[in-house]
Each structure stands twice: as C-alpha cells, then as structure tokens.
Amino acid sequence: MAKKALVKEGTYFDSVTLMSISKDVKALDGVREATIIMGTDSNKEILKSADLLVPEAEAAKANDLIIVIDGEEEILDKAIEDTNKMLAEKKSTSDQEQEYNPGSLDGAINAQPDSNLVIISVPGEYAAREARKALNRGLHVMLFSDNVSVEDEIALKELAVEKDLLLMGPDCGTAIVNGAPLAFANVVSRGPVGIVAASGTGAQAVSSLVDRQGVGLTQVIGTGGRDLKSKVKGIEMIKDMKALAKDENTEIIVLVSKPPAEEVSKKIMEEVKKIDKPVIVNFLGGDPSVVEGTDAIWADTLEDAALKAAAFIKGEGEVNSAGLTEEEVAEIAKEETSKMSKDQKYLRGLYTGGTLCSEAVILLTEEFGEMYSNAPLKDELALKEDLKSIKNTVIDLGEDEFTKGKPHPMIEPSLRNERMVQEAEDKKIAVVLLDVVLGYGSHMDPAGEVAKAIKEAKETVKTRGGYLSVIASVCGTEKDPQNLQAQEEKLRQVGAKVLPTNVQAVRVVSKILSDLN
C-alpha cells in the first residue's frame, strides 16, 4: 500500500460534501482509505491520528483542500483524477442549483433581508464570532458548530438574553421553529406542545411520538448539550421555557435532557414554579424527586414524556400506548431465543442517536447492572481504546472517536454496517439492538442501508448453527422524507423485529438476555 496527496489551494467545500465524496472515493477498487478535508490544524490532527498526514498535507493552509488516498500504488494517480472529477461535478451541480451562494453573513442578510434566523455551521474557531455578529444584527441563531469554548457560549447566551433572541447551541443539531424543521429534525404537525431540549435525538424522539398520537408541536427548541452544565447554568433552557410560557399557542411544555448539574436542576425547578402551564420534565436517568415542591410532571423515558404530553391534550383515554404487555414481550423473546445455539448470550447495541443510546444504557444498566459502552454510566464499564465490545455492549457510533474525519452515522450508515458485520463474528453474540433515525439531514434510506448489514450478519451467524436476533426501533413520522412505515417494512423484510419505540425495543432485549442467562 502507498499514499498520495493533492493540495488544492484556496478551494472550499462544506464538510458534508467532502465526507460524501470521501465515501465514494473509498469505494473505488484498490483504495484502502480516502480523506478529503480542509487544511485546518484540527483536520491535520485527524489526518495524523489516521496515519495520513503526508508532507504535502502538513504544509497546507486552512483555506486549502487536502486530498489523501491510501491504496495500491498503481491506482493512486487514477484515484486522484477521479476525485477531482467528483469535486468538479459537485461544484458544477451546486452552481446550477444556487443562483446566489453568499460567502459571508452580510451577503446572506443582503440576499434575504426578511430572514430572522441564522443557522451557523463553520469551524468552531470562527463560530462564536459569526454568532455574535448575527445576534447584534437582531437575528435568532441556531449554532450547529461544535468546538466553541464554554466562555464564548456563556457570553453569547447572555447577549441573546439581553436582546431577547434564541441562541440554540453550540452543537445544536435539532430544532423546529414555527413549523420549519432545522438540521436533523422530523416533519411534524403544528399543535399545542412545546419542547425545550438539550439533546438532539431526544427532541426528535419526543416530537415524533407526540405527532404519532395526532398531536402537534408549537416549537422544538434546542439548547446545546452543555446548557445544563454547572458553568452555563441553564441560560437557554430557562429563557426558552419562559418564552413558551408566554406563547398563547403552547398549552404544555416538555423539558428533555440528561440529568443537569444539581444546582442547575434546582434553578430550573424554581423557574418552573413560576409557570402557570403544565411542564413535563424528562431528565434521562435523573432523580424523580427533582420535581417535588412543583407542579411539574416527571417522565421516566422519552416515550413517557411524549405520551404524557399527548394525554394532556387529548385526554388519558384517547392516547394509544406504545407499550407491549408482558405477555407480548415474553412471546417475542421466546420466538427469538428458541432459534439460538447454547453459546449465544450477549447483546451488541449499535446506535446512531446519542440520546437514544443513553436511554438504552440507562434502562439496561438498571436491569442487569453491567453494560459496557463508550458512553457508560460508570467509568469501569468504559470500552478500552480499541473500542472492542466486551460482553454486553451498547455503543454510540456518533461519538467523536468514531466520527473524526468521517460523516455522522445518521448521514452515512456505512460505519454501523461495518461494525455490525464485524460483531457477527463473535460466537457469543445473540442480539443486536439498533435505532433508525429519520428526518431532514439523515440518510434518505437508513433502513435500506442497515438492512444489507443485517442480512449479512444474520447469514454469518446462521452458517455456524446459530441465530442472530435483531431488535430495532425507528424514530420518525409518516411525513418524513423517508416515511416511517416504509422504513419499518424494510427492516422487517430482513428478519428484524421492529418495535414502536426505543423503550419497547429495550424491554424485548432485556427479556431475551434474561432468558439466555
């Protein structure tokens, strides 16, 4: 194997485009690895960690485009040529599709002077500056960028409070504002439920499940994952909650997050006491006693939060519970385990949604006490540096250790597919637990893509006399571009058991593991 690099000076493409083209180049015959990224210092670190930082790439500047291909020596020149063609075709298509592509915030505002919200997705070192400019221009901000310092986050959120504007983020990936899905978000109906969430797939799960009950959303406001940490003090969640309390169209408010810092939790609950609308609190894995002394309603899970919100609007008797009976869970588990060999005993959870993964880890840990993960509840259950699964393991494939220089698995499913096929080689694997997340921003056929890996993994286990159980849930709605029903059917066609929610999928997996052990 050999490496070849090309640096294209002063050439810019957005990261999603580059990741997509990198995937296509990697699929070329003879290519082992391909990375196409901008020449920033952080990207050079990614190349270094992947052993792809050749001298040409090391000399590149931040505004230069770096192409590095590792593969058979005789195909490298052709692979570089093909990469250039792909980039040229992408630029040509982009130029034809967009009459005007502004190169600055000022240019965008001049082009669309009536816009009142800016989505910012630039490298972290520039993001705070752009967000500050937007706020000072009187614009709401969704700050998709990560790698923004906590100090900048606090300053931006304090400025947003002063100007009575939204500052969603940093690292905010999901929002629905006045019915418009932003970034990773689902297509839901308008209605009386408002959500403030410090978690992206948490917001997606709750909003989708509310919609499935025939109830709509006023707003889904993301705060960024650090908002409820001690330093940030819940600035955005408190501000957004107050805004929904004043909104005449919002009848009930749902708060979604992993457990806040204790002092932040108390601060939020003090604000909840001042609100004369019902508030549902879903702090995953948190202490229900946090709502004591308030009129807030505790929700144990994302499913629970959505059903309670829908029940308040429709009436308790009008809500279709997503839950399976104990008998139904036992029947599915018996059907699955009856086909397994005596050696099969372990779970492998392969998640693309971080909050859905956290929910699974929390629920399974409560049941079994020992659940290994790259996002564990206890340090001693953290996966080692090689990220190899240990006994029962649940993995968040969207974490940085998997996505450096690569697209998020909700955008590009190949990372999970490769991992699933790899996991199937373990003779003790019994069940795979997975999520499929729909909506804007996600892959246009995530179930179709993972179905290929499910089929291959099941065949691998079958050839050695076993049976691989695959338990899945799909987060999304019928109105999403991918269509909920169509995606669920693609999973069923390859033998996966599809449950209505992540919680119900975990219940089935828990029963399978209990029966096997």
Image (spheres, rainbow, N blue to C red):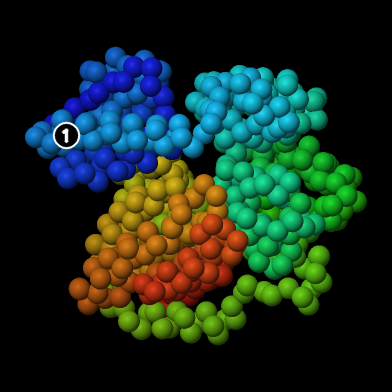
Q: Which residue is mark 1?
A: 78
Q: Is residue 381 left or right of 33 when viewed as pictured? A: right
The quarter holding residue 133 reads top right
Residue 95 position, x and y percent, is 45, 31
The quarter holding residue 47 reads top left
Identify which residue is drawn at 34% across, 47% down: 387
Q: Residue 409, can we see it?
A: yes
Q: Is residue 307 left or right of 473 when viewed as pictured? A: right
Q: Is residue 487 above or below residue 37?
A: below
The quarter holding residue 48 reads top left
Identify which residue is drawn at 20% across, 73% down: 464
Out of 115 and 235, give the one closest to the viewer. 115
Out of 67 and 351, give the one closest to the viewer. 67
Q: Residue 362, can we see it?
A: no
| Quadrant into which the N terminus falls | top left
Kind of residue at badge 1: Lys
Q: Is residue 81 above or below residue 179?
A: above
Residue 420 position, x and y percent, is 33, 59
Out of 429 and 50, give the one closest to the viewer. 50
| Quadrant into which the C terminus falls | bottom left
Residue 411 position, x and y percent, is 44, 47
Q: Residues within 10 Å of mark 1 (few under 14, many from 20)?
A: few
Helix, strand or loop at label 1? It is helix
Identify which residue is drawn at 28% across, 33% down: 85
Q: Is residue 370 left or right of 389 when viewed as pictured? A: right
